Each structure stands twice: as structure tokens, then as C-alpha cells.
Amino acid sequence: MEKIKSLTDLKRIRDEKQSGLQTREKGELAENLVQVKVAMATCGIASGAKETMEFMMSALEKRGVDALVTQTGCMGYCYAEPTIEVTLPGEEAVVFGGVTHDKADEIIEKYIKDGELVDGIIPVNYEIIDNKE
Amino acid sequence: MSKYSMHLLVCGGTSCKSQESDILAEKLKKELSKQGLDETVQVIMTGCFGFCDKGPIVKVMPDNIFYTQVKPEDAEVIVEEHVVKGKSVERLLYKDSKRKGLNKKQLRIALRNCGVIDPELIDEYLARDGYQALGEVLANQTPEETIELMKASGLRGRGGAGFPAGLKWDFARKNKSDQKYVVCNADEGDPGAFMDRSILEGDPHSVLEAMAIVGHCIGADMGYIYIRAEYPLAIERLKIAIGQARNYGLLGKDILGSGFNFDIDLKYGAGAFVCGEETALIHSMEGERGEPTLKPPFPAESGYMGKPTNVNNVETLANVPVIILKGADWFSSIGTETSRGTKVFALAGKINNVGLIEVPMGTTLREVIFEIGGGIKDGKKFKAVQTGGPSGGCLTEKHLDTPIDYENLVANGSMMGSGGMIVMDEDDCMVSIARFYLDFTVEESCGKCSPCRIGNKRLHELLERICEGKGEESDLLRLRNLGEVIKDTSLCGLGQSSPNPVLSTMDNFNDEYVSHVHDKKCPSGVCTDLLEYFIVEENCIGCTACARACPVGAIAGERKEPHLINPDTCIKCGACMDKCKFEAVILK
């Protein structure tokens, strides 16, 4: 990995990565992909988030859905673990709670494939500060 | 894509459900099919919106319209007016002139990246302005300027006592030495607290970046994270993060071409509660016993290896980069006069939405428990909330509308602590709760000073006696006196605060103590020694199952006649209760 040598460098790399957040290994703009984030903190993993993540990855691949499944930290909904966030291309992100195998299956078949919402949505009840001044 | 052009999201949180939101959802479906719209409009039950006092909530998508306090009877008007005619129903509309959508109670600053980025990819942190604050500080600010900025922001320590962070850095900066250290206190030990773990697991780089900033401010080139070995995932992610930051040159020599060197290493704790106290933590890092020493000297004068050391908690550090980027004025505009910014709380206990939350200081307990937390489980009555862990106290009904900040919590006999919040309902016995926390402090006392080592043990014995029904009225006075003495004479924060759970429950729930001691009754039915097994005459059919199960022959009665338990012989094993199929045996 190349070292970052100055603040100017750092800013350039940030701008690259900001668009880079969109482009991943597939060389495709992530905004054109289905993005799935799985909350993988200790609490999530203890409730089965790892299995959910593995299932999502293999099931999406098997069913031919072009998707990007990544891990993330705690979303805060301990009462509804495992929790995942799904972003369909051009849509707002939706958070689902209590995502077991069956639920994951339903989310793929109904929401991801057809855009049809399913029970178990968690309304995001917080605001995140934007980092910009 | 979707065959549905509209969605009606009905809150299925426990609180809304108890107000018939599930019936409402059914009625909405019925009304839709009446209008022949069930193929184009879908009704969905969601989790809690965190807005329970205005429940049940219905959100119409994609119109983004909120209806509040919707009753099943309102289903018809919503479908006819809104869905069919496209007119919103004024009467039920949520009104808040300031914002669109529901007024969100939570604001994530320390948790800004948790649940957003992949914690194992530094690039995602960089894309969210990661390490920009460090770059800014190194390129454009003197250490004094950064410290002034921190002071002006009003950021106070999030680990418990709430000492102003900028001032702490200033002390460490002013002490001259050839070597100084930055320490991150990640020894999170309060039962039920997991704020720091979540930050380290979800956003490790924010802590690393902040430590480097502190290093620059105080003149240190080495930082340590003291983390408990019970946090393996946090440790793993920190190691990955440190490696990635080194690879990019964001840790190590000549960071960003500024000539500033800083590196970070991990030190593992064995999970002793007292090691969260900064002097004990430093001794543990040095390989000594984890025992506190008297302050002064403060770590800022003589800390790790006898060198000036600045110790900050994880959450405090996680706030630092944002404050530098967005400015002191922005940060100090959030919160209350004395407590700026936000606080992360771990909500646990008898609450519907157990979770990790972050709210601006000054939010009330009622908002936290009944709105964000979704209220008490199973519709039970709220009794108390324990804040500040074993060092804190219990707050009750009358404190619900108190804005949460450092001063208010202390004034009401509790403290901020690190942010654990354990909610109790009517079934919890406050004497047992006090005993539970004392159990913990007795176990965790390092044993160095006698008030804490012996005093807490005696305090615990007194509580044990009271719970067993052997308490005398003079014990209550003894509890209070002993508690006060331990508070006044202990060496460190652990002992000085350990009687708090006892004293605060005595203040707020004196009647429970009195009934344990005087009437030998536990009003909540928790202390088994004070309970007796009874047979309810109306329910007993005289099957004799209980009498046959009783190992001491304490149950008498004719076949097909109600039975009776002899309390003098009964050993309270509960065998009769397990055997009875008619719920005739009860504990009272």
C-alpha cells in the first residue's frame, strides 16, 4: 500500500475513495448493485449474523442477483438482531430486523427481486451527523 | 419492479401493538380490498419507530406522510381519503413545523460510522472524512490551538466522572518530559454496558485517529489501548485497523509529512473492574497489580512508567475527530449548558427495545425509556432505572422528566457513569438489586483499602440478612451509616461510589426495606426466603399430586378436597408448584 504523504494527498485519496465507496472489485458502480450490509458486532454475531451473511452471499449468487454483501458495525437494534440494511439501486436504504434464514429468503425473493416490502422493517430512529462542515 | 405503488407501514412495536396497531393493519387490508386496491397498495408491519407516546404510527410511502395516534376505526378514512383521493387526513397528521418526518430523538456523533462502514476497511473510513482531522491538526494547528478548541467545545470525559477533555490534555502538555504517553481506556466493566465495545468493533479508526491527535497535542509519540481480553472481536478489528493505518503511513514515522511520529499498541486487561480507574489501569499496564493509588500525582504528571500520561475513554476519543472538523461551536450547540454533545447509552433490562442509543445531553429519561426504548416489557409498570452501573444509583418515576446530564444525575443520587442503563419494572425487588450490585463490588474490590474491602463485605452481609428475613430495624440505620463511611473514606472511585446503589434505593424505596425488615415480606415477590407457598382453595381439586411430591410431608388434605401447606414444615423447594396442573399453588 502506498503511503499517504500529506494532507493534500489525504484529501485526494478521500475524494477517490468517496467515489470508490461506490466502485468495488466488480469494477461496477455500486449504486447499480443491490447492497446488503450485515451488522456484525459481537451482539449481532452472537445472534447469528455470520450465518445470515453467509446465507445472503451464497443465496444471492445462486439466484443470480448482482449484489454486494458487506459487514458493518452495530446499528444499535439489539432487540432485533441479526439486522441487515438493504439498498436497492436508486432507492433509500431499508433496515430489516430479526433476519433468520427464512426471513433472509423472503427478503431476497420479495424485496430484492420484486421491490415488495416485507414485515420486519425497522424504521431508522436516529440521525447521523454528516461529517462535512 | 414492485407491483405495489404504495405502502402503508404500520408500527408493530410492542407499545403500538398494545394499542391495537395489529388490528389496525388488518382493517387497513380489509378496507383496501373493499376498494379493490389490495393488489396495488401493501400494508406492512414494521419494528418500533421510537415514537411510542404518539403511537400507533402509520407511515405512507412513497408520500412520506406520518399519521399518529391512529385507531382501528381510522382505517376507513385513511384508505378513502389518502389512498383513493390522495388527500392527507389532517386530523391524524403528524405536525412538526421544524422537520419533515418524525422528529428523531437520536443523534449519532460518536456512533457516526457504526453500522455504516465496514470496520475492517480503512478506505471506507477515509471516504467518511477519516484522518482528515489528524491531517488538519498536523498541517494547520499548533497543539495549543487544538487544545483551546477542545476546551471551547466543552467535551467531557465519557467514562464516568466527566472531566473536561481539553483541560486534561492541557495538564499533560504542560508537564515537561522526554517521553509521554496517550492511553485509551477500553476497560469497559459496568454490567450491561457495551458502548465502547460497539465503537471499537464498528469504527476502530476513529479512536486511533483521536489518539494520534492527543499525541500531537501533549507531545507523545506512543499510545496504548488498554482493552479487556473479553473483547476478542474488538481486539481483532483494532489490530487490523492499526495495521492498515501503518500501511498508509497514518501511524508511524513522519505522519503526513509533518515530522510527527506516533504509533499505537494494545495492552490487554484481565477484566478487573477496578482497572477502569486510571491509576489502577496504568499499574496493570506496567505489569503491576491492578490497584489504584492516591491522586495526586495525577497521570498527567506521573503516569505510565512514571511519565506524563493522558488517559481518555473510548467514547470521548470517538468524538474528537468530528469536533476538530466541524468546530467547537457546532459541538457546544448540542446538549445542555454544562454537558455538551451527545451520550451513548446501552439500554438493557425490562425494556422493549434493548439497544445501543445515542442522544443529545438533556434528553429526558422518559424520552429514552418510553420513546426510544419502546416502554416496559409486557406492559408492566416502570419502577426504576439504574444508571452509572455499580457506582451509580436508581432513578425513579419522579426523575423521568429530568434532562440527562452529568450534574442532574449526580444531584438525583446517581451518576452518568459510562452509560449503562438498566430498566426495572414492578417485579424487581430493590433490596435484591442493591444486593446484586454489592455482590459485584465485593467481588471486584481490589482489597487495598479497608473501607472498601471490609466495609462492602459487611454491607453485603447486612443486605443478605435483610433478604433472608433476618434483618432488624437497626440494620437500616447501620446500612446507611456504613454506606456513608465507605463513601467518605475509600481510596478510589470504586469504593467511594460502591454504596450508591444501596443508598439510592434506600432513599427512593425505603418502604421496600421497611417491609423486608419489619413485616418480613418482599413486596415484589423476589426474595424467596420471605415468600410462602399457598394453595388457592378455589383452584385446588384435591388431586393429591402436590402432597405426594412434597419431600417433607408439609401438605395435608383429603382426596378431592382442597389441600393445605403447613408453613412451619415447608422447606420452600417448590416441588408442589411444579407438580400442580391447576395453578393452585402460588408464592406469596
Image (tube, coloured by chain):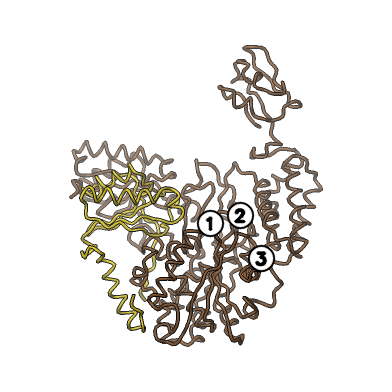
Chain colours: A yellow, B brown
Residue drawn at (51%, 64%) of the image: B362
The kind of secondary structure element at disc 1 is helix
| Residue that numbered label 2 is attached to | B395
Residue B34 percent across, percent down from the top left: 21, 36
Q: Nearer the viewer, residue B79 or A79?
A: A79
Q: Which residue lies at the image location 50% right of the left edge and 60% below the top edge?
A: B195
Pointers 1 and 2 in contact (CB under 8 A)?
yes
Q: Amino acid at mark 2?
A: Leu
Query: Can residue B416 be seen here?
Result: no
Numbered disc in front, either 1 or 3: 3
Q: Are marks 3 and 2 on the same chain?
A: yes
Q: Chain of mark 2?
A: B
Residue B505 appears in the picture as rendered: yes
Residue at image position (58%, 52%) is: B385
* Label 1 Cα neighbours within 10 Å, binned few <14 / some 14-19 / many ≥20: many
Q: Position of residue B371 (x, y in %)?
A: 46, 53
Instruction: Identify residue for label 3.
Output: B290
**Is B476 located above or below residue B235 in the figure?**
above
The numbered mark 3 sits on a residue in which chain? B
Badge 2: residue crowd in 10 Å (few <14, some 14–19, many ≥20) = many
**Is residue B12 positioned above or below B172 on the image?**
above
Discs 1, 3 touching: Cβ within 8 Å: no
> Residue B365: which numbered mark, if any?
1
Q: Tag 2, which secondary structure? A: strand
Pointer 3 and pointer 2: residues touching (CB < 8 Å)? no
* First along the sequence among labels 1 and 3: 3
Residue B136 image point, x, y percent? 40, 82
Labels 1 and 3 within one chain: yes
Residue found 62% across the figure and 75% down from its top = B304
Going by the image, does B466 lie left or right of B42? right
Kind of residue sitting beneath label 3: Gly
